[in-house]
């Protein structure tokens, strides 16, 4: 099989896996909520009637939150990137097709991925913070994250590992391949050297990049349960992630010290009757914004 055929097969597999992972069907409304890092102050974050919201990402200065959003009767393929002032002083503003936005370290640009409904292909796109100047940089899906280093964009490669795109050279390299298969919503530590990710087979892991950023070693934080989105505390000592432990009915937010062997701690103050997902830690370390929704059937306590 030649390389073009291999690439085509890999992309078809990626599309199928994305649809199986997300379930490209209409979902219940996912509003954005916020909670203080100590578990107090649970409250709605942004007023988005008629729209579901996911994958929030704070701007580096803490003034805005970018996220993806779609009408409640539509699917992920209809997702657009939006930004909203963190203080609620203005309504959200749509920037165009895309999902899972991530800010550049200087706050002037965003990277996101698109679904086939937007461009008839999966792409990773860079644009200005106002939505102008859209430029595709990669022709694959990938939950892109802008590295705090500024010169690299990490994403899930066609092999479902970690790939780094060098903005200077325009070249992409794989730094982590199987046996790990990354879930969407991985996160990069403030020093740009560690990646927290959920594995599709279960568990939460930490990939530590070498000095040359060419390969990574992996340490497991949790070896069970389902995890997707994660986010680092500004001091780089903790991660918050959505986790569904074995035998638990709903996804909830958990916090863990990455340098300890302690088990994840349920973030107090959450509504145990809701799925709480897609957390993102504010740059000042005080607030976590996340998506929250009631389960479609048989609402029950998470534990």
Image: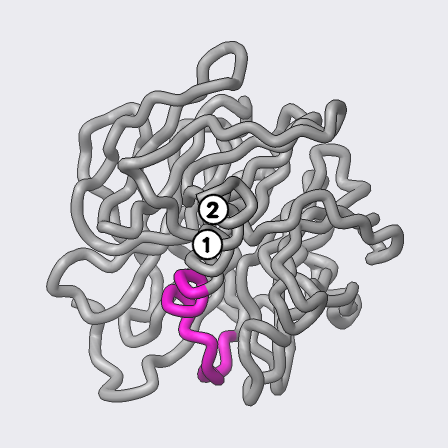
Secondary structure category for the residue under label 1? helix
Q: Is residue 113 above or below residue 102?
A: below
Q: Which residue corresponds to the image point at 76% horizontal and 34% vertical from the top-left?
A: 106
Image quarter of residue 164: top right
Image quarter of residue 123: bottom right
> How many C-alpha atoms fall within 10 Å of the one at disc 2: few (<14), some, or many (≥20)?
few
**How far, Cα to Cα, is label 1 from label 2?**
5 Å
The dot on residue 217 is none
User: Circle 1 is placed at which residue position?
Assistant: 9
Image quarter of residue 148: top right
Secondary structure category for the residue under label 2? helix
Image side of residue 197 versus residue 120, left or right = left
Image side of residue 286 versus residue 110, left or right = left
Residue at the right extreme of this rendering: 133
Q: Is residue 267 something that shows in the picture?
A: no
Image side of residue 189 versus residue 59, left or right = left
Q: Which residue corresponds to the image point at 71% horizontal and 66% vertical from the top-left?
A: 119
- The spot of residue 112 in percent (x, y) is 65, 52
- The spot of residue 85 in percent (x, y) is 74, 59
For the residue pair 39 and 101, the one nearer the viewer reads as: 101
Q: Which residue corresponds to the image point at 47% horizontal and 46% vertical from the top-left?
A: 6
Q: Quadrant of the N terminus?
A: top left
- Residue 29 inside the magenta-drawn segment: yes
> How many C-alpha atoms fall within 10 Å of the one at disc 1: few (<14), some, or many (≥20)?
few
User: Circle 2 is placed at which residue position?
Assistant: 6
Residue at the top extreme of this rendering: 211
- The spot of residue 238 in percent (x, y) is 38, 34
Q: Which residues are magenta?
A: 16-30
- Residue 222 inside the magenta-drawn segment: no
Q: Which residue corresponds to the image point at 38% horizontal and 53% vertical from the top-left?
A: 228
The answer to whether the residues at label 1 and label 2 have Cβ atoms under 8 Å apart is yes
Q: Is residue 37 something that shows in the picture?
A: yes
């Amino acid at each position: 099989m030649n390389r073009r055929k291999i690439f085509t097969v890999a992309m078809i597999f990626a599309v199928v896996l994305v649809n199986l992972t997300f379930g490209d069907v209409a979902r219940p409304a996912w509003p954005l909520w916020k909670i203080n890092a100590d578990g107090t102050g649970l409250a709605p974050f942004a007023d988005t009637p008629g729209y579901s919201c996911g994958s929030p990402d704070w701007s580096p200065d803490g003034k805005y939150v970018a996220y993806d959003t779609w009408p409640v009767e539509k699917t992920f393929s209809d997702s657009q990137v939006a930004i909203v002032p963190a203080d609620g002083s203005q309504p959200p503003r749509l920037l165009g097709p895309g999902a899972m936005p991530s800010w550049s370290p200087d706050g002037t640009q965003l990277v996101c991925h698109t679904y086939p409904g937007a461009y008839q292909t999966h792409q990773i796109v860079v644009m200005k913070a106002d939505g102008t100047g859209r430029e595709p940089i990669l022709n694959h899906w990938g939950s892109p994250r802008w590295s705090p280093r500024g010169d690299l964009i990490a994403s899930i490669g066609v092999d479902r590992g970690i790939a780094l795109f060098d903005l200077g050279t325009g070249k992409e390299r794989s730094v982590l391949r199987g046996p790990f298969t990354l879930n969407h919503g991985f996160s990069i530590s403030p020093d740009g050297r560690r990646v927290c990710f959920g594995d599709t087979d279960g568990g939460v892991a930490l990939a530590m990049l070498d000095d040359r950023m060419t390969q990574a070693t992996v340490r497991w934080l949790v070896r069970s349960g389902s995890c997707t989105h994660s986010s680092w505390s500004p001091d780089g000592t903790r991660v918050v992630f959505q986790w569904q432990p074995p035998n638990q009915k709903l996804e909830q937010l958990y916090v863990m010290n990455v340098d300890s062997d302690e088990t994840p701690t349920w973030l107090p103050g959450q509504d145990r009757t809701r799925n709480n997902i897609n957390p993102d830690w504010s740059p000042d370390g005080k607030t976590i914004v996340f998506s929250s929704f009631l389960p479609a059937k048989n609402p029950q306590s998470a534990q």
